Image: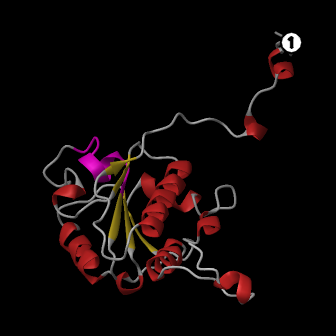
């Protein structure tokens, strides 16, 4: 949106306040990890150099709910942990966003027992589901990018994007680990005996 002031006053930009606030919110998401199982390992891997969550401005993992605005529930949640998780959610800063990471957090996974919550969406409003057992770090990054896109496009008073599901992707090995054609043509080892 241009008002013509940019040509008369060099170095001056004109915009709407909600667009500026959305741009600022996009790159200031501070996640709070609530990792209890193997999904937590994949969440930690998304912060490593190969995937580098820092590219998206979300590398500042906060372990205090008063400093975080994105709760990533990774792994199974037991009924004893549920009141603590609900209190953490209540203490979080607005806008409170929740990612349910993995089959255990979303549906209880293979743990169909009385002690494991069969989906945190029964107790917390979930904005984004990351399916898989465990989801790949690429899915975590894609989920954070979707949350950032919502933050950029939505006005500060807009409704939350509840229930978005990122489709599971087939894991592909990195380029440096893929076998080459020469690897298959090597003759088998001969064993003396």
Q: Is 7 drawn above or below residue 159 in the view shown?
A: below
Q: Is 190 drawn above or below residue 8 in the view shown?
A: above
| Residue name at image x 20 percent, y 67 percent | 82
Is residue 138 among the parts visible in the rendering?
yes
Secondary structure at numbered mark 1: loop
| Residue name at image x 51 percent, y 53 percent | 142
Q: Magenta includes 167?
A: no
Quarter-of-image position of residue 131: top left
Can you give x and y, in whole percent of width and height, for residue 127 in the image?
A: 32, 59
Q: Give the range drawn in magenta.
A: 100-111
Q: Magenta includes 102?
A: yes
| Residue name at image x 33 percent, y 80 percent | 94
Query: In this image, 109 relative to 166: left or right?
Result: left
Residue found at the very far top of the displayed protein: 193
Q: Quadrant of the C terminus?
A: top right
What residue sits right under mark 1 in the picture? 187
Can you give x and y, in whole percent of width and height, for residue 4 in the image?
A: 64, 80
Query: In this image, 104 relative to 68: left or right?
Result: left
Residue sitting nearer the eye, 37 or 61: 61
Residue sitting nearer the eye, 175 or 55: 55
| Residue name at image x 81 percent, y 25 percent | 180
Query: In this image, 131 relative to 149: left or right?
Result: left
Quarter-of-image position of residue 76: bottom left
Can you give x and y, in whole percent of width and height, for residue 150 in the image?
A: 42, 63
Crowd tier of the residue under label 1, counting other residues whose Cα lies within 10 Å: few below 14, some 14–19, many 20 or above: few
């Amino acid at each position: 949106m241009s008002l013509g002031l940019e040509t008369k006053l060099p170095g001056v930009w004109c915009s709407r306040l909600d667009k500026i606030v959305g741009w600022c919110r996009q790159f200031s998401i501070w996640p709070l990890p609530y990792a209890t199982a193997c999904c937590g390992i994949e969440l930690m891997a998304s912060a490593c150099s190969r995937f580098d969550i820092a590219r998206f401005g979300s590398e500042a993992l906060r372990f205090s709910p008063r400093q975080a605005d994105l709760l990533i529930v990774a792994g199974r949640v037991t009924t004893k942990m549920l009141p603590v998780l609900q209190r953490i959610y209540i203490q979080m800063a607005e806008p409170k966003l929740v990612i349910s990471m993995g089959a255990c957090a979303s549906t209880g996974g293979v743990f169909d027992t009385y002690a494991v919550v069969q989906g945190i969406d029964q107790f917390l409003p979930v904005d984004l589901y990351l399916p898989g057992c465990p989801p790949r770090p690429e899915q975590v990054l894609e989920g954070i990018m979707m949350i950032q896109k919502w933050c950029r496009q939505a006005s500060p008073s807009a409704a939350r994007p509840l229930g978005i599901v990122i489709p599971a992707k087939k894991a592909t090995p990195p380029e440096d680990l893929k076998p080459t054609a020469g690897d298959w043509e090597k003759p088998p080892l001969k064993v003396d005996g």
